[in-house]
Image: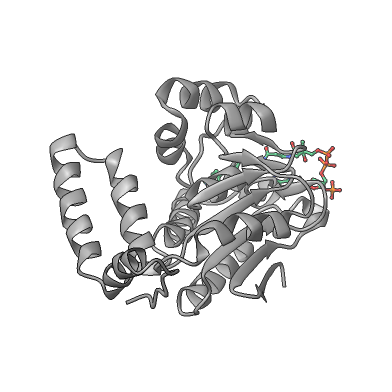
Amino acid sequence: MTVRLERRGAFAVLTLDRPEALNALSFAVLEEIGTRLDKIAGSDARALIVTGAGSKAFCAGADIKELRGRALTAQRRGIELGQQTFAKLDTLPMPSVAVINGYAFGGGLELALACTFRLATPNAKLGVPEIKLGLIPGYGGTQRLPRVIGEARALEMVMTGRTVEAEEAERIGLVSRIVEGDPVAAGIAFAESFAGFSLPVLGFARAAVQRALTVPLVEGLKIEADLATLAYQTQDAEEGMAAFVEKRPPRFQDA
Ligand code: DAK
């Protein structure tokens, strides 16, 4: 098994577990990630933490040894498998937190980019070095990276393939913070900051923000109005406002 799924209290933890290959994404690993994500989607986990086994790598990207000598149709299917697998993260009912604990290159960074949040350990090194192999990112990197760090910086990363260290990644917003210590514990500590909130309302918030960069402002404002109205209609909104007025902590029910 090269992808481990565990439960840590209220949280699901997905660990890429091929440290001998720096957790590279073979097609079998991609399939396993997809199967695990389906299982997580049907669970009551409050958040998903994604990380890599060992102390060196989150994920060193697509398994380069597997990519050579394949027919174009097979390559296209491989790309689509990666894109579809990572797209599942966007629609999980719970937020996902990538804890980048070492190298996150190519497909590894694309996996992290598909997560709701990205944290990095101080030794993290991030990049999309596909250009050095005569390739370009194919698992969502050319689309998600500019949405996260802007076009100029994304073009620079994609077209030079250069490595970004943890501190720069934090400065340019590629990760939201640098965390010390055990990566899973750090991911869980971060997830605790939203785990008590209503999952459907968190989902509305994520959807509204993610649409901001893909649609014109006027349409985005309509999406926001729709989702804000939906949030208002939840029992959790009623509970949250009642709890405020009654000066007590809210008890959200995900309803
Ligand atoms: N694939 C396969 N094996 C890998 C690997 C990778 N991406 N990265 C590392 N390994 C393996 C190494 O081969 C080595 O195995 P052995 O030789 O011991 O058997 C082991 O992991 C340890 O690696 P190193 O000895 O190289 O360790 P170092 O600490 O010296 O260097 C490194 C670490 C991360 C700097 C280096 O390993 C490295 O540069 N790795 C490759 C990084 C990279 O270029 N990743 C791929 C990005 S491109 C597509 C589908 C997807 C994509 C494109 C097209 N189609 C279906 C068409 C996307 C591609 C990418 O992700």
User: Which quarter shows the C terminus?
Assistant: bottom left
Image height check: is 60 above or below 95?
A: above
User: Splitting the image into 4 quarters, where does residue 1 fall?
Assistant: bottom right
Relative to residue 206, is residue 14 drawn left or right?
A: right
The percent coordinates of residue 34 (x first, y second) are 52, 68
Name the residue located 46 percent from the left edge and 79 percent from the top edge.
Answer: 42
228 on left or right of 164: left
Residue 25 as seen in the image, left or right of residue 209: right
Q: Position of residue 170 (x, y in %)?
A: 60, 32
> On the picture, is 89 further left or further right than 101?
left
Total label count? Answer: 0
Pick the residue in front: 189 or 106.
189
- The foreground one among 15 and 204 is 204
- Residue 165 visible, this orientation: no
**Residue 216 visible to an observer of this rendering:** yes
Tell me residue 10's x, y (percent): 59, 74
Residue nearest the observer in this picture, 117 or 241: 241
93 vs 79, nearest the viewer: 93
